[in-house]
Amino acid sequence: MLLRNNDTIFRVLKNQDDKSLVIDCIRRTMPKWILTASLSDFEECTELSMYAETKYSYARQLSSQDLRIARDRFTMIAGILPFIGDEQKRSQMISFLADQCSKQTLRRYICLYLVYQDINCLAPLPRYEKRLTPDEQNMRWGLNKFYYTQQKQTLTAAYSKQQTKH
């Protein structure tokens, strides 16, 4: 269930007695237990409005490579998900599984998955290569030719050589 109040969107993951386990969908912080009564000011929210607020592209087509990466990332966090409500066990599992990647990366994957409840959100984002202006191309050429060499020249010396050669 998604709940919204002003600029905060919570996803309720579990209810237990008078407490609810929630994750902040905007800030994507680790889930925490709060009193269910404190959610009385919140109103229900749709998945689509949450996607729009967080700028999540749920309909994008994934390549087979991206899908494989998303499944691998989900496999890394799958062992942690049963302990999501117990902070101590969750931290122990994150520490135990942090040999493949950093603890922070695991936490980021967990938060992403819990916010969107979708394996596809773990796929890498598309990268776009920026087109260089002619000045940037000239600078890159000069740096590659005169600065990134075995002589390890200073940037000033490389700039001087570029000015005389170019």
Image (cartoon, rainbow, N blue to C red):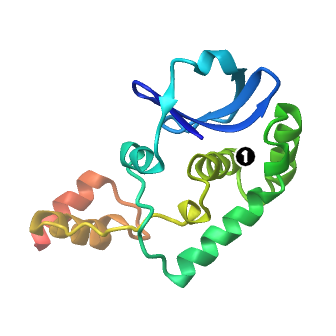
Mark 1 surroundings: few (<14), some (14-19) or many (≥20) residues within 10 A: some
The count of marks equals 1
Q: Residue at x 89, y 38 (%)?
A: 89
Q: Position of residue 4 (x, y in %)?
A: 47, 30
Secondary structure of residue under mark 1: helix
Q: Residue 21 at x, y = what percent?
A: 72, 32
Please tell me which residue is depicted at 66% across the width and 16% down the height of the picture.
Answer: 37
Q: Nearer the viewer, residue 129 or 48?
A: 48
Measuring 86% from the left and 46% from the top, which residue is drawn there? Answer: 93
The front one of 81 and 145 is: 81
Circle 1 residue? 103
Which part of the image, by quadrant, shows the N terminus? top right
In depth, the one of 111 and 11 nearer the eye is 11
Which of the 4 image quarters holds residue 85? Answer: top right
Q: Residue furthest bottom?
A: 64
Can you tell which quarter of the image residue 73 is in? bottom right
Give percent across and percent down for residue 48: 41, 51
- Type of the residue with mark 1: Lys
Q: Which image quarter: residue 90?
A: top right
If the image is split into quadrants, where does the C terminus sit? bottom left
As drawn, 98 above or below 75 = above
Q: Name the spot of residue 22 as percent of width and height, x first.
A: 66, 33
Q: Is residue 57 left or right of residue 166?
A: right
Relative height, residue 15 to residue 74 (above, below): above
From the viewer's perspective, is 65 left or right of 7?
right
Residue at (76, 61) in percent of width and height: 76
Q: Does residue 161 appear left or right of residue 102 in this picture?
A: left
Taking 118 as reference, is 108 above or below it?
Answer: above
Residue 42, above or below 142: above
